[in-house]
Image (cartoon, helix red, strand yellow):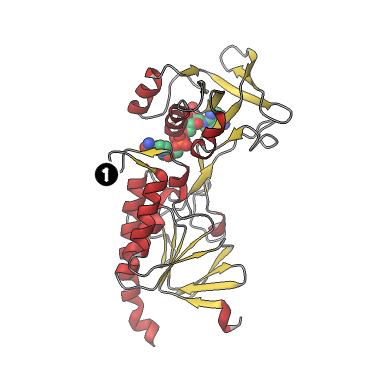
Amino acid sequence: MNEQSLIQADVIIIGAGPGGLTAALYASRANLKTIVIERGAPGGELLNTSEIENYPGFTQISGAELADKFYSSAMSFGAQHVYGDVEKITIQDQMKQVLVGDKVYQSPVVIIATGAHNRRLDIPGENQLSGQGVSYCAVCDGFFFKNRELVVIGGGDSAVEEGTYLTQFAEKVTIIHRRDRLRAQEILQERAFANPKVEFIWDTVVESINGDMMVESVTLKNVKTNEVTDLKTNGVFVYIGIVPNSQIVSELGITTPEGWIVTNDIMETSIPGVFAIGDVREKHLRQVATAVGDGSIAGQRAYDYIQSLEPQLEK
Ligand code: NAP
Protein backbone atom coordinates (compact mmCIF):
# COMPACT_ATOMS: atom_id res chain seq x y z
CA MET A 1 0.00 0.00 0.00
CA ASN A 2 1.58 3.35 -0.91
CA GLU A 3 1.64 6.27 1.51
CA GLN A 4 -0.85 8.39 -0.43
CA SER A 5 -3.61 5.85 -0.30
CA LEU A 6 -3.55 5.52 3.51
CA ILE A 7 -5.46 8.23 5.36
CA GLN A 8 -5.28 8.30 9.15
CA ALA A 9 -7.96 9.62 11.48
CA ASP A 10 -9.12 9.20 15.05
CA VAL A 11 -12.70 8.45 14.11
CA ILE A 12 -14.23 7.33 10.84
CA ILE A 13 -17.98 7.61 10.52
CA ILE A 14 -19.65 5.74 7.68
CA GLY A 15 -22.89 7.46 6.68
CA ALA A 16 -23.96 11.11 6.93
CA GLY A 17 -27.57 10.78 8.06
CA PRO A 18 -28.80 12.35 11.31
CA GLY A 19 -26.92 9.77 13.41
CA GLY A 20 -23.62 10.02 11.53
CA LEU A 21 -23.69 13.82 11.44
CA THR A 22 -24.40 14.03 15.17
CA ALA A 23 -21.55 11.60 15.93
CA ALA A 24 -19.31 13.82 13.76
CA LEU A 25 -20.34 16.89 15.75
CA TYR A 26 -19.56 15.26 19.10
CA ALA A 27 -16.31 13.59 18.02
CA SER A 28 -14.88 16.68 16.26
CA ARG A 29 -15.93 18.94 19.13
CA ALA A 30 -13.95 16.61 21.40
CA ASN A 31 -10.94 17.48 19.21
CA LEU A 32 -10.75 14.11 17.45
CA LYS A 33 -9.74 14.00 13.81
CA THR A 34 -13.05 12.92 12.33
CA ILE A 35 -13.81 11.83 8.79
CA VAL A 36 -17.37 11.18 7.59
CA ILE A 37 -17.63 8.98 4.49
CA GLU A 38 -20.91 9.17 2.56
CA ARG A 39 -21.81 7.74 -0.84
CA GLY A 40 -24.76 10.05 -1.47
CA ALA A 41 -25.78 13.53 -0.39
CA PRO A 42 -25.46 14.27 3.35
CA GLY A 43 -28.79 13.89 5.15
CA GLY A 44 -29.61 10.23 4.58
CA GLU A 45 -33.30 9.39 4.71
CA LEU A 46 -34.11 12.97 5.71
CA LEU A 47 -33.69 13.81 2.05
CA ASN A 48 -36.52 11.41 1.21
CA THR A 49 -38.83 12.75 3.91
CA SER A 50 -41.37 15.45 3.21
CA GLU A 51 -42.06 17.13 6.55
CA ILE A 52 -40.68 16.41 10.01
CA GLU A 53 -42.87 17.45 12.93
CA ASN A 54 -41.57 15.19 15.69
CA TYR A 55 -38.03 16.50 16.00
CA PRO A 56 -37.89 18.80 19.03
CA GLY A 57 -37.24 22.47 18.37
CA PHE A 58 -39.07 22.56 15.05
CA THR A 59 -42.86 22.44 14.90
CA GLN A 60 -42.50 21.63 11.22
CA ILE A 61 -39.46 21.51 8.97
CA SER A 62 -38.75 19.87 5.63
CA GLY A 63 -36.40 16.89 5.65
CA ALA A 64 -34.01 18.68 3.30
CA GLU A 65 -33.83 21.80 5.50
CA LEU A 66 -33.16 19.77 8.64
CA ALA A 67 -30.48 17.80 6.78
CA ASP A 68 -28.81 21.07 5.83
CA LYS A 69 -28.83 22.28 9.44
CA PHE A 70 -27.40 18.98 10.71
CA TYR A 71 -24.66 19.13 8.09
CA SER A 72 -23.59 22.72 8.92
CA SER A 73 -23.58 21.90 12.59
CA ALA A 74 -21.57 18.69 12.11
CA MET A 75 -18.90 20.42 10.00
CA SER A 76 -18.54 23.45 12.27
CA PHE A 77 -15.88 21.86 14.53
CA GLY A 78 -13.57 20.58 11.82
CA ALA A 79 -15.00 17.21 10.83
CA GLN A 80 -14.14 16.32 7.25
CA HIS A 81 -16.72 15.00 4.82
CA VAL A 82 -15.55 12.83 1.93
CA TYR A 83 -17.50 11.16 -0.83
CA GLY A 84 -17.10 7.42 -1.12
CA ASP A 85 -18.75 4.03 -1.22
CA VAL A 86 -17.23 1.84 1.49
CA GLU A 87 -16.52 -1.68 0.27
CA LYS A 88 -15.12 -3.34 3.35
CA ILE A 89 -13.93 -2.88 6.91
CA THR A 90 -11.01 -4.90 8.23
CA ILE A 91 -9.66 -5.03 11.78
CA GLN A 92 -5.97 -5.30 12.69
CA ASP A 93 -5.37 -5.23 16.43
CA GLN A 94 -6.76 -1.89 17.59
CA MET A 95 -6.81 -0.28 14.16
CA LYS A 96 -9.65 -0.51 11.68
CA GLN A 97 -9.21 -0.09 7.93
CA VAL A 98 -12.07 1.21 5.82
CA LEU A 99 -11.64 0.46 2.13
CA VAL A 100 -13.03 2.98 -0.38
CA GLY A 101 -11.87 2.45 -3.98
CA ASP A 102 -8.09 2.92 -4.04
CA LYS A 103 -8.04 4.62 -0.61
CA VAL A 104 -7.74 3.11 2.83
CA TYR A 105 -8.93 5.13 5.82
CA GLN A 106 -7.49 3.93 9.12
CA SER A 107 -8.51 4.75 12.68
CA PRO A 108 -8.99 3.15 16.09
CA VAL A 109 -12.71 4.00 16.00
CA VAL A 110 -15.28 3.30 13.30
CA ILE A 111 -18.88 4.38 13.73
CA ILE A 112 -21.30 2.66 11.35
CA ALA A 113 -24.25 4.89 10.51
CA THR A 114 -25.26 3.41 7.17
CA GLY A 115 -29.02 3.42 7.77
CA ALA A 116 -31.53 1.32 5.89
CA HIS A 117 -33.24 1.28 2.51
CA ASN A 118 -36.81 0.62 1.40
CA ARG A 119 -37.83 -2.99 1.08
CA ARG A 120 -38.93 -4.03 -2.40
CA LEU A 121 -42.14 -5.91 -3.13
CA ASP A 122 -40.45 -8.37 -5.45
CA ILE A 123 -43.47 -8.75 -7.73
CA PRO A 124 -43.76 -8.74 -11.55
CA GLY A 125 -43.52 -5.27 -13.05
CA GLU A 126 -41.81 -3.65 -10.04
CA ASN A 127 -38.28 -3.54 -11.42
CA GLN A 128 -39.28 -2.93 -15.05
CA LEU A 129 -41.48 0.05 -14.14
CA SER A 130 -39.21 1.51 -11.46
CA GLY A 131 -38.81 5.17 -12.41
CA GLN A 132 -41.67 4.75 -14.89
CA GLY A 133 -44.38 5.20 -12.28
CA VAL A 134 -43.02 2.97 -9.52
CA SER A 135 -41.33 5.01 -6.79
CA TYR A 136 -40.01 4.66 -3.25
CA CYS A 137 -39.78 8.41 -2.58
CA ALA A 138 -42.80 10.71 -2.45
CA VAL A 139 -40.65 13.81 -1.93
CA CYS A 140 -38.57 13.04 -5.00
CA ASP A 141 -41.33 11.97 -7.38
CA GLY A 142 -44.69 13.23 -6.03
CA PHE A 143 -44.56 16.35 -8.19
CA PHE A 144 -44.71 14.25 -11.38
CA PHE A 145 -48.19 13.04 -10.46
CA LYS A 146 -50.13 16.31 -10.47
CA ASN A 147 -53.87 15.57 -10.74
CA ARG A 148 -53.16 11.85 -11.22
CA GLU A 149 -54.38 8.82 -9.34
CA LEU A 150 -51.87 7.00 -7.15
CA VAL A 151 -51.54 3.82 -5.18
CA VAL A 152 -49.47 3.58 -1.98
CA ILE A 153 -48.63 0.13 -0.66
CA GLY A 154 -48.09 -0.46 3.07
CA GLY A 155 -49.68 0.32 6.43
CA GLY A 156 -46.85 1.76 8.53
CA ASP A 157 -45.82 5.34 9.35
CA SER A 158 -44.14 5.83 5.97
CA ALA A 159 -47.08 4.64 3.84
CA VAL A 160 -49.65 6.69 5.73
CA GLU A 161 -47.56 9.85 6.14
CA GLU A 162 -46.19 9.92 2.62
CA GLY A 163 -49.57 8.84 1.19
CA THR A 164 -51.19 11.85 2.84
CA TYR A 165 -48.36 14.09 1.60
CA LEU A 166 -48.98 12.90 -1.97
CA THR A 167 -52.53 14.33 -1.90
CA GLN A 168 -51.09 17.80 -2.42
CA PHE A 169 -50.23 16.65 -5.96
CA ALA A 170 -52.51 13.73 -6.76
CA GLU A 171 -56.25 13.78 -7.27
CA LYS A 172 -56.67 10.57 -5.36
CA VAL A 173 -54.38 8.32 -3.29
CA THR A 174 -55.40 4.74 -2.54
CA ILE A 175 -53.51 3.09 0.30
CA ILE A 176 -53.47 -0.68 -0.07
CA HIS A 177 -52.74 -2.63 3.09
CA ARG A 178 -52.48 -6.37 3.60
CA ARG A 179 -54.41 -6.30 6.89
CA ASP A 180 -57.53 -4.49 8.13
CA ARG A 181 -55.66 -2.30 10.64
CA LEU A 182 -52.85 0.15 10.11
CA ARG A 183 -49.54 -0.09 11.93
CA ALA A 184 -48.96 3.69 11.66
CA GLN A 185 -49.11 6.09 14.63
CA GLU A 186 -52.66 7.23 15.58
CA ILE A 187 -52.04 10.87 14.65
CA LEU A 188 -50.99 9.90 11.13
CA GLN A 189 -53.97 7.56 10.78
CA GLU A 190 -56.42 10.26 11.90
CA ARG A 191 -55.04 12.69 9.33
CA ALA A 192 -55.27 10.15 6.53
CA PHE A 193 -58.83 9.10 7.48
CA ALA A 194 -59.88 12.77 7.53
CA ASN A 195 -58.37 13.50 4.10
CA PRO A 196 -61.06 13.30 1.39
CA LYS A 197 -58.44 12.41 -1.24
CA VAL A 198 -57.24 9.30 0.63
CA GLU A 199 -59.00 5.96 0.22
CA PHE A 200 -58.09 2.57 1.67
CA ILE A 201 -58.26 -0.94 0.33
CA TRP A 202 -57.93 -3.44 3.19
CA ASP A 203 -56.83 -7.08 3.40
CA THR A 204 -55.27 -6.84 0.00
CA VAL A 205 -51.89 -7.53 -1.55
CA VAL A 206 -50.57 -6.31 -4.87
CA GLU A 207 -49.70 -9.22 -7.13
CA SER A 208 -48.28 -7.31 -10.09
CA ILE A 209 -47.70 -3.81 -11.42
CA ASN A 210 -48.80 -3.53 -15.02
CA GLY A 211 -48.01 -1.25 -17.97
CA ASP A 212 -45.89 -1.10 -21.12
CA MET A 213 -43.85 2.08 -20.85
CA MET A 214 -45.53 3.52 -17.74
CA VAL A 215 -47.60 2.16 -14.87
CA GLU A 216 -51.20 1.62 -15.98
CA SER A 217 -52.70 -0.64 -13.32
CA VAL A 218 -52.05 -2.97 -10.41
CA THR A 219 -53.45 -6.45 -9.96
CA LEU A 220 -54.86 -6.92 -6.47
CA LYS A 221 -55.75 -9.98 -4.47
CA ASN A 222 -58.03 -9.87 -1.45
CA VAL A 223 -56.36 -12.20 1.07
CA LYS A 224 -59.68 -13.06 2.76
CA THR A 225 -61.81 -13.82 -0.32
CA ASN A 226 -58.99 -14.59 -2.81
CA GLU A 227 -60.79 -12.33 -5.29
CA VAL A 228 -58.42 -10.89 -7.93
CA THR A 229 -59.13 -7.48 -9.47
CA ASP A 230 -57.33 -4.84 -11.51
CA LEU A 231 -57.13 -1.21 -10.38
CA LYS A 232 -56.15 1.52 -12.82
CA THR A 233 -53.48 3.87 -11.51
CA ASN A 234 -50.82 6.27 -12.78
CA GLY A 235 -48.23 5.54 -10.13
CA VAL A 236 -47.27 3.18 -7.32
CA PHE A 237 -45.40 4.25 -4.17
CA VAL A 238 -43.99 1.33 -2.19
CA TYR A 239 -43.58 1.75 1.59
CA ILE A 240 -43.45 -1.75 3.04
CA GLY A 241 -40.65 -1.37 5.54
CA ILE A 242 -36.91 -1.06 5.56
CA VAL A 243 -33.85 -3.29 5.21
CA PRO A 244 -30.52 -2.52 6.95
CA ASN A 245 -27.55 -1.28 4.90
CA SER A 246 -25.12 -3.58 6.66
CA GLN A 247 -23.51 -5.47 3.79
CA ILE A 248 -20.08 -3.97 4.57
CA VAL A 249 -20.03 -5.60 8.00
CA SER A 250 -21.61 -8.90 7.01
CA GLU A 251 -18.35 -10.75 7.70
CA LEU A 252 -17.70 -9.18 11.09
CA GLY A 253 -20.29 -11.21 13.00
CA ILE A 254 -21.99 -8.21 14.60
CA THR A 255 -25.48 -8.43 13.05
CA THR A 256 -28.71 -10.30 13.67
CA PRO A 257 -29.68 -12.87 11.01
CA GLU A 258 -31.76 -10.08 9.37
CA GLY A 259 -28.72 -7.79 9.19
CA TRP A 260 -29.43 -5.27 11.98
CA ILE A 261 -26.24 -4.41 13.91
CA VAL A 262 -26.37 -5.40 17.57
CA THR A 263 -25.04 -2.89 20.11
CA ASN A 264 -25.27 -2.25 23.83
CA ASP A 265 -26.80 0.95 25.19
CA ILE A 266 -23.58 2.90 24.60
CA MET A 267 -23.61 1.93 20.90
CA GLU A 268 -20.69 -0.51 21.17
CA THR A 269 -20.76 -3.60 18.99
CA SER A 270 -18.98 -6.73 20.17
CA ILE A 271 -15.78 -5.44 18.45
CA PRO A 272 -13.92 -2.88 20.60
CA GLY A 273 -13.82 0.48 18.82
CA VAL A 274 -16.60 -0.39 16.36
CA PHE A 275 -19.85 1.42 17.13
CA ALA A 276 -23.20 1.41 15.30
CA ILE A 277 -25.92 4.06 15.41
CA GLY A 278 -29.23 5.06 13.84
CA ASP A 279 -31.50 2.95 11.67
CA VAL A 280 -28.92 0.23 10.93
CA ARG A 281 -28.84 -0.67 14.62
CA GLU A 282 -31.18 -3.22 16.16
CA LYS A 283 -33.56 -1.00 18.13
CA HIS A 284 -37.21 -0.33 18.87
CA LEU A 285 -37.78 3.19 17.61
CA ARG A 286 -36.26 4.42 14.34
CA GLN A 287 -36.61 8.19 14.35
CA VAL A 288 -34.49 11.25 13.65
CA ALA A 289 -34.51 11.96 17.38
CA THR A 290 -33.28 8.48 18.32
CA ALA A 291 -30.58 8.54 15.61
CA VAL A 292 -29.37 11.87 17.03
CA GLY A 293 -29.32 10.35 20.53
CA ASP A 294 -27.33 7.35 19.28
CA GLY A 295 -24.89 9.64 17.44
CA SER A 296 -24.20 11.82 20.47
CA ILE A 297 -23.49 8.77 22.64
CA ALA A 298 -21.19 7.17 20.04
CA GLY A 299 -19.31 10.44 19.41
CA GLN A 300 -18.65 10.83 23.13
CA ARG A 301 -17.79 7.16 23.67
CA ALA A 302 -15.33 7.36 20.77
CA TYR A 303 -13.42 9.95 22.79
CA ASP A 304 -13.50 7.77 25.92
CA TYR A 305 -12.35 4.74 23.94
CA ILE A 306 -9.38 6.59 22.40
CA GLN A 307 -8.40 7.95 25.81
CA SER A 308 -8.38 4.42 27.17
CA LEU A 309 -6.09 3.31 24.31
CA GLU A 310 -3.68 6.19 24.25
CA PRO A 311 -0.95 4.74 26.54
CA GLN A 312 -1.00 1.54 24.44
CA LEU A 313 -0.94 3.41 21.11
CA GLU A 314 2.10 5.44 22.21
CA LYS A 315 4.18 2.31 22.98
P1 NAP B 1 -42.85 -0.49 8.92
O1 NAP B 1 -43.21 0.26 10.15
O2 NAP B 1 -42.04 -1.73 9.04
O3 NAP B 1 -44.22 -0.81 8.16
C1 NAP B 1 -44.20 -1.58 7.00
C2 NAP B 1 -45.64 -1.79 6.53
O4 NAP B 1 -45.62 -2.50 5.29
C3 NAP B 1 -46.48 -2.60 7.51
O5 NAP B 1 -47.78 -2.08 7.58
C4 NAP B 1 -46.47 -4.00 6.88
O6 NAP B 1 -47.67 -4.71 7.11
C5 NAP B 1 -46.37 -3.70 5.40
N1 NAP B 1 -45.66 -4.75 4.66
C6 NAP B 1 -44.47 -5.34 4.96
N2 NAP B 1 -44.13 -6.21 4.01
C7 NAP B 1 -45.13 -6.19 3.10
C8 NAP B 1 -45.35 -6.88 1.89
N3 NAP B 1 -44.47 -7.77 1.41
N4 NAP B 1 -46.48 -6.62 1.20
C9 NAP B 1 -47.37 -5.72 1.66
N5 NAP B 1 -47.22 -5.02 2.80
C10 NAP B 1 -46.10 -5.26 3.51
O7 NAP B 1 -42.04 0.43 7.88
P2 NAP B 1 -42.08 2.01 7.56
O8 NAP B 1 -43.46 2.52 7.58
O9 NAP B 1 -41.25 2.17 6.33
O10 NAP B 1 -41.29 2.65 8.77
C11 NAP B 1 -39.93 2.29 9.02
C12 NAP B 1 -39.49 2.90 10.36
O11 NAP B 1 -39.42 4.33 10.26
C13 NAP B 1 -40.49 2.59 11.47
O12 NAP B 1 -39.75 2.40 12.64
C14 NAP B 1 -41.32 3.85 11.55
O13 NAP B 1 -41.91 4.07 12.82
C15 NAP B 1 -40.29 4.93 11.20
N6 NAP B 1 -40.95 6.12 10.61
C16 NAP B 1 -41.41 7.09 11.45
C17 NAP B 1 -42.07 8.20 10.92
C18 NAP B 1 -42.57 9.28 11.86
O14 NAP B 1 -42.34 9.18 13.06
N7 NAP B 1 -43.25 10.30 11.38
C19 NAP B 1 -42.27 8.32 9.55
C20 NAP B 1 -41.80 7.30 8.73
C21 NAP B 1 -41.15 6.19 9.27
P3 NAP B 1 -48.06 -5.26 8.58
O15 NAP B 1 -48.52 -4.08 9.34
O16 NAP B 1 -49.12 -6.27 8.28
O17 NAP B 1 -46.80 -5.89 9.11
**Image-based side of 218 in relation to 268, left or right:** right
Q: Tell me if residue 163 comes above or below residue 94 in the rendering.
A: above
**Image-based side of 211 in relation to 112, left or right:** right
Q: Residue furthest left?
A: 57
Q: Nearer the viewer, residue 279 or 161?
A: 161
**Mark 1 is on which residue type?**
Pro
Quadrant showing the C terminus: bottom left
Image spot of residue 4 (x, y percent): 57, 81
Q: Tell me if residue 285 comes above or below residue 268 in the rendering.
A: above
SS for tag 1? loop
Q: Tell me if residue 294 comes above or below residue 184 in the rendering.
A: below
Q: Residue at x 36, y 70 (%)?
A: 78
Q: Residue at x 56, y 23 (%)?
A: 148
Q: Residue at x 40, y 44 (%)?
A: 63
Q: Residue at x 48, y 43 (%)?
A: 48
**Image-based side of 251 in relation to 111, left or right:** right
Quadrant showing the N terminus: bottom right
- Badge 1 crowding class, 10 Å Cα cut-off, few under 14, some 14 to 19, many 20 or more, is few
Image spot of residue 120 (x, y percent): 59, 37
Name the residue carrying label 1.
Answer: 56
Image spot of residue 157 (x, y percent): 42, 32
Q: Nearer the viewer, residue 297 or 231?
A: 231
Q: Is residue 117 visible?
A: yes
Q: Residue furthest right?
A: 212
